[in-house]
Amino acid sequence: MAQEYTNEDGSTGTYNEDGSGSYTAADGSTQTWDADGGGTYTDADGSSGSYSADGSYSHTDADGNSHSGDAEGNQSYEGAEGSTGTLNADGSGTYTGADGTTATQDVDGNGSYEMADGSSGTWDADGGGTHTDADGSSGSYSADGSYSHTDADGNSHSVDAEGNESYAGADGSSGTMSADGSSTHTDAEGNSSTTDADGNGTYTDADGSSGSYSADGSYSHTDADGNSHSGDADGNSSWAGADGSSGSYNADGSSSYSDAEGNSSTMDADGNGTYASSDGSSGSYSADGSSSYTDADGNTTAYDAEGNMSESQDMAGGDALDGAFGGDSGGDYGGGDYGGEDDKMGDDLDIAAAQSDAKEMPADGGKEDSVADAKPEADDGIPKVDEDDKTLDG
């Protein structure tokens, strides 16, 4: 027989002999339960539900979202906006969104999804996955941290578990970046470069030029025409032209140069230098202003630091005088043999006496010398010899 009761707050209820009953709270919420442990409820906010002794249940909230579970632990839900889903005791499940998005997961934790915008993806139980976006881009990722991505324009990028990266541009460029800091790059025009972990690198340009550089500051470069240039870590450099010319520039200020014609020069750190021309001439110069020059015929001219010509200079005029008054080239004055090497001073005196006698002798058999009547010429410092007083040679 049922028992009914009413509480002071206005709530009421019943108890049946089999253990079933009901209850209505003062706020209007109600409950029922049966003899087996099942029941129903309706809350004051409008939510309601039921439950069974086997553990199954259902619930609908005030907004219309519902959720239920069976005795085995499988669950399902339905959103007021139209979404639905299941979650099974074995870990598998499904989802359908109000916008049409769907997803599934199997008992091992692997799943897939497809969004309303057309994008899709997968995931695995180990934490990896793939994705394809609505714009056409796509990628993948792994539990070890590696991943890859290709954008809608075809540019791709990937990273492995150790942090090494690679990329490829839609324009044909490509490259790598390693975890140790080394890298490579090739651009769309065919220019390429490499850098190692220590900062040393090489490059090759599309025009055929190439070079290298080192972390210590040294470098080399060869252009498309075959001209090359290099520098070491201490600031010394050298170059070689495709035409055969070459040279060097050193950190201490010294240098050298050779052109394609065979002309060359050197300069030391103090500003002293030498040069040699392809015609055989050569010379030197010093920082103090002194210099020397030897022409192709072997004649040498030298100047000291004050600009004075060295006494050792070979001069053409000196050679001519030597020929006139010295050696074996002396003329035959009045039948005598002058200028002998064994008695040069005596020969010179004999020549002077012969010339004096010749001047005193009338050239025309007693007439005065016509030269004596001539007007004197201005003295230009060069000894004059009258026509009639020329050397009486032979």
Image: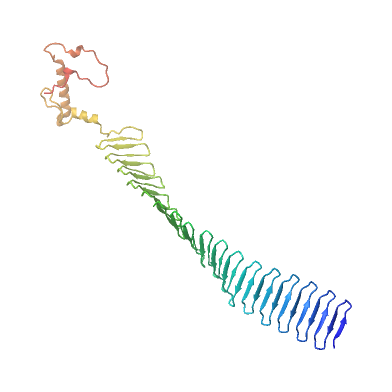
Q: How is the image coloured?
A: rainbow
Q: In this view of the protein, which residue sits in the foreground, 356 or 67?
A: 67
Q: Residue sitting at 64 percent across and 72 percent down?
A: 95
Position above or below: 133 against 315:
below
Residue 41 appears at what percent x and percent y? 78, 78
Which image quadrant for residue 62?
A: bottom right
Which image quadrant for residue 392?
A: top left
Count of numbered circles in the view: 0
Q: In this view of the protein, which residue sits in the foreground, 327 or 187?
A: 187
Q: In this view of the protein, which residue sits in the foreground, 387 or 265?
A: 265
Residue 375 appears at what percent x and percent y? 23, 12
Which image quadrant for residue 83?
A: bottom right
Residue 98 appears at what percent x and percent y? 66, 68
Q: Residue furthest right?
A: 8
Q: In this view, does 293 lie to the left or right of 113?
A: left
The quadrant of the rendering that contains the C terminus is top left
Position above or below: 340 against 182:
above
Q: In this view, does 334 lie to the left or right of 152?
A: left
The quadrant of the rendering that contains the N terminus is bottom right
Position above or below: 81 against 58:
above
